[in-house]
Amino acid sequence: DPHADPGFTREPLRDEVEAVVIGGGFGGLLAGARLREAGVESIRVVEKAGDFGGTWYWNRYPGIHCDIESYVYLPLLDELGYVPEWRYAPGAEILRHAQAIGRHYDLYRDACFQTGVTELRWDETHWIVSTDRGDRIRARYVVVSNGTLDRPKLPGIPGIETFRGHTFHTSRWDYGYTGGDANGGLTGLADKRVALIGTGSTGLQVVPHLGRDAAHLYVFQRTPSTVDVRANRRTDPEWAARLEPGWAARRRENFLRVISGYPVDEDLVSDSWTGSAALLGNITPTGMRTMTPAEEELADFRKMSELRARVDALVADPVTAEKLKPWYRYACKRPGFSDEYLQTFNRPNVTLVDTADSGGVERITGSSLVVGGEEYEVDCIIFATGFEVGKSDVLTGRLPVHGRDGQSLLGSWRSGPRTLHGFYSNGFPNLFHLGPLHNASSVNFVHVLDEQATHVGAVVAEARKRGATVEPTVAAEDAWLRTIERTAPDLEQFLAECTPGYYNNEGKPRKRQSFGEGPVAFHELLREWRRGPGLAEVLG
Ligand code: N01
């Protein structure tokens, strides 16, 4: 594909499409799919990467997998008639599925890859979308879905800029240096001393490969992750053959209900996530609590004791095992899963360096990392240090948006974002936001994105039918903000006893700007709103 060629150039576009979708990850693909179903003919996805896939385009590190069951994580399985090959799919399969969605909904036709949107400006009837390739595209509708965990974060360790060896972030894996591919075989590391910083979900997936292939691996840990059973396996073809139409949507809804603490006849997924659902209520607002706080604390202690016992069972050296044991409450960090990670520390060429006492790596020199006065000489540092949190292009102003009468979105959000249901704002007609804002999220984030995309598709379908513009009234926004204020979960007390980790040290929001009755109730609220007179609030 010429668009994916790094040196590719093209003439600036001066044309008009009905809808521009910013971002070609699962959110943008779902928006494209649902707009197509709403009858929108010309849809242009504008994407910085060379192809669809979003996070799964950029993240190709060895061992990359989906940490949610792929039968509920991958979107549009019913629509594409696809059953994933693995229960927890590797990144390559997920990327292929993203591309298949692009083909199925004919989204490649008008897509602009390797292109970043630089400004949105409303000109009374249309948006003018400007890009870093000099494009000026007119569009009736714009959907912003440009990512939440998309900007790699490097730690601000003193001296980091003085290191003379090789460095990269896991989301930009350098196979030119390491050799091999996402399945491992990192032959370039056979004579290298490698440091890995970060032991979140990414660190857990990478460490077994680095341990296998590097001459020596130092894993720098600040907070140990929980490491629960994974039990990945290939999809049983007989099971796949028995699946009935609509199976994926039913399973996905079942997962959301179980994870959110709702009673179900049967837990269809029944894995380490659903088994711990009752413990997640502290951090993900579920709307349903089945236990008293005391029962919850006891259940949490039991679960964490079980996970600590797993470390003892799998790690031979008792001192190393002790350091690997998570000491906090379950929901304090995103839960981790692996059947290989802990065993890696039994290898003679792997060293765990606990940095908890110094709050992380103290210092980096030209050739080493320093922790507790000890110096670790390495050839290469790999950063599994996560992503910027809560710094979307719209909220930071990196993507300036000018609405009716030239008003800027950041200006009108000076005292905080204002939306109806997280989707749209007064003064910014036909502009839709996807992602975590004023709504309810879930650990299965792609499911949430699909509910959002479905809603946008339905609203656009109705707007086209009526020849109307989509824009909420100020009164509708006010009412929704009061609902958020009333229901938003107050996490202060819980987080005060937590780790520094869940928000990647980006500060702990005292109150989340989210709908506290949880995703099941939020999706139901949207469906009700679409059935009722709600549309009148946005279709002038
Ligand atoms: O990043 P993270 P990630 N010194 O932010 C450590 C999802 N995901 O790339 O815990 C030393 O979670 C930090 O330590 P601490 C994943 O669920 C999904 O792993 O803050 N260490 C932590 O260990 C998550 O939501 C899949 O004390 C430092 C690590 O770096 C998101 O993606 C697969 C440090 C960062 O962990 C990001 O996960 C992979 C410092 N100065 C990831 N600064 C799926 O399968 C940071 N750390 C769907």
Image: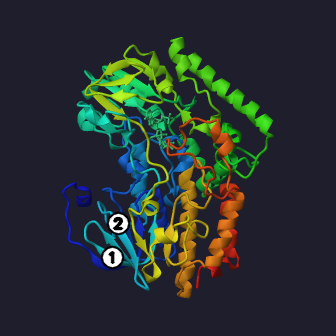
Residue 206: quarter of image? top left
Q: Which residue is mark 2?
A: 117
The residue nearer to you, when weighing 319 against 478, is 478
Q: Quadrant of the N terminus?
A: bottom left
Number of the front mark, 1 or 2: 2
Instruction: Judge from the rendering whether residue 527 lies leftward or rightward of residue 408; answer left or right.
Output: right
Q: Residues within 10 Å of mark 1 (few under 14, many from 20)?
A: many
Q: Secondary structure at mark 1?
A: strand
Where residue 250 appears, x then y in whole percent?
64, 54
Q: Residue furthest bottom?
A: 467
Figure check: 326 above or below 418: above
Whether disc 2's CB lies below 8 Å from ligand 1 is answered no
Q: Which residue is mark 1?
A: 137
Tell me which numbered mark, 1 or 2, is placed earlier along the sequence.
Answer: 2
The residue depicted at 66 percent of the width and 68 percent of the height is 480
The residue depicted at 65 percent of the width and 28 percent of the height is 304
Figure check: 104 above or below 348: below
Question: Is residue 341 visible from the viewing direction of this image?
Answer: no
